[in-house]
Structures are given as C-alpha cells and as structure tokens.
Amino acid sequence: MLTSLDLKTWHLIHKWTSLVCTLFLLVICVTGLPLIFREGINDWLSDDPPYAVLPADTPRADLDHLIKVSRSRYPGQIVRFVFIDDDEPQVIVTLAPSHESSPEDNHGIKFDARTGQVLKEFPPVDKRPLTFLGLMLHLHA
C-alpha cells in the first residue's frame, strides 16, 4: 500500500520529469513549424536578384555555355552536378576542386535559365553564414 509520503514523492518526480519532456516537445514544435514552411520563408527572406521578365515561350540558355562560364570562373575545378529546375527558371551548376573532394567542398553558381545571367554564387557549406532556417534545422535535429 502506498503511503502519503510515497504519493508526494511520486507526484514531485512525475511533475518535474513531465516538465523536462514538455521542454523538449516545445523545442521540437517551435523549430519544426518554420521547417514545414521553409520554401515560403526562403522566398520571403531571399536576397536573390529577381528573374528577368521575359515571355513564357523564351528558349532556355544553352547548358554547354553555362558549364563553360562556370569552368571559366573556377578553372581547374570539375562540374559535379547540373540542376535544372522545373518550377523556377534557374539552373544551378555545382563544382568541386577535384573528384576526391568531399561534398562539403562543393560550391555552386545559380544562373537564370533563359538569359544565362549569373544570379548568385554559393560558397562551400562550411563557409556559408548561418541562416534562420539553418539554425531552426540545427535545433530541431
């Protein structure tokens, strides 16, 4: 049979362990919500220059030309990936110093897919500044 002292002790243990669990759940909820809406938040916080206003039937720039521009900006580096976006008129060319480089060494160049204009350059992962969403992802994980 439980005594009054046992019940008080159990109540204190239950209360404080529940508060600790609640703190973890609160962090998960508060940091997870911005991650759900990350695309909209990224668009809102983006400092990327806008795409050129062109007719919808404007042909896309030549991919070979975009790769040539990328290689001329970073001679001696290799092209790892070329990402062609179906939703936005953008092409991202990802480069690395060598085939043996780790993925953290990759850096990219974002082009307007129609004009071939360089819109933005992405430094390697370890040289990127911490963003709001990066902090939320770090805390959430």
Image: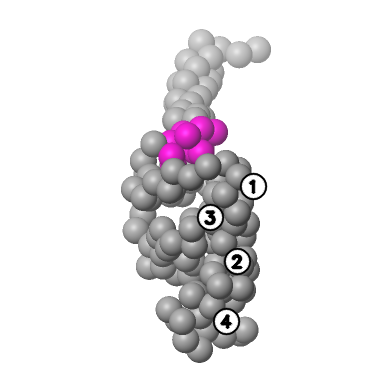
The residue that label 3 is drawn on is 114
For marks 1 and 3, the one nearer the N-term is 1
Secondary structure found at label 2: loop
Q: CA distance from mark 4 to mark 3?
A: 24 Å
The residue carrying mark 4 is 78
> Looking at the picture, how far across and down is residue 35, in whole percent?
51, 37
Q: Earlier in the sequence, mark 4 or mark 3?
A: 4
Label located before the other in sequence (1 or 4): 4
Distance Cα–Cα, label 1 vs label 4: 24 Å
Disc nearer the start of the sequence (3/2) = 2
The crowding category of the residue bearing disc 1, from other C-alpha atoms within 10 Å (few below 14, some 14 to 19, many at least 20), is few
User: At 36% across and 41% down in the image, what residue appears?
Assistant: 45
Identify which residue is drawn at 47% across, 66% down: 109
- State the residue in front, 47 or 3: 47
The nearer-to-camera label among 2 and 1 is: 2
Residues at marks 3 and 2 touching, judged by CB atoms closer than 8 Å: no
Residue 78 horizontal/vertical position (percent): 57, 81
Q: Label 1's element?
A: loop
Relative to residue 96, is residue 58 depicted above or below?
above
Q: Disc 2 marks which amino acid?
A: Asp
Residues at marks 2 and 1, CA–CA distance in whole angstroms: 16 Å
| Residue at 60% across, 66% down | 62
Q: Is the C-beta separation of discs 4 and 3 under 8 Å?
A: no
Sequence-wise, the earlier of marks 2 and 1 is 2
Q: Nearer the viewer, mark 4 or mark 3?
A: 3
**Which residue was labeled with disc 1?**
86
Which disc, if any, is residue 62? 2
Q: Which residue is nearer to you in this view: 46 or 34?
A: 46
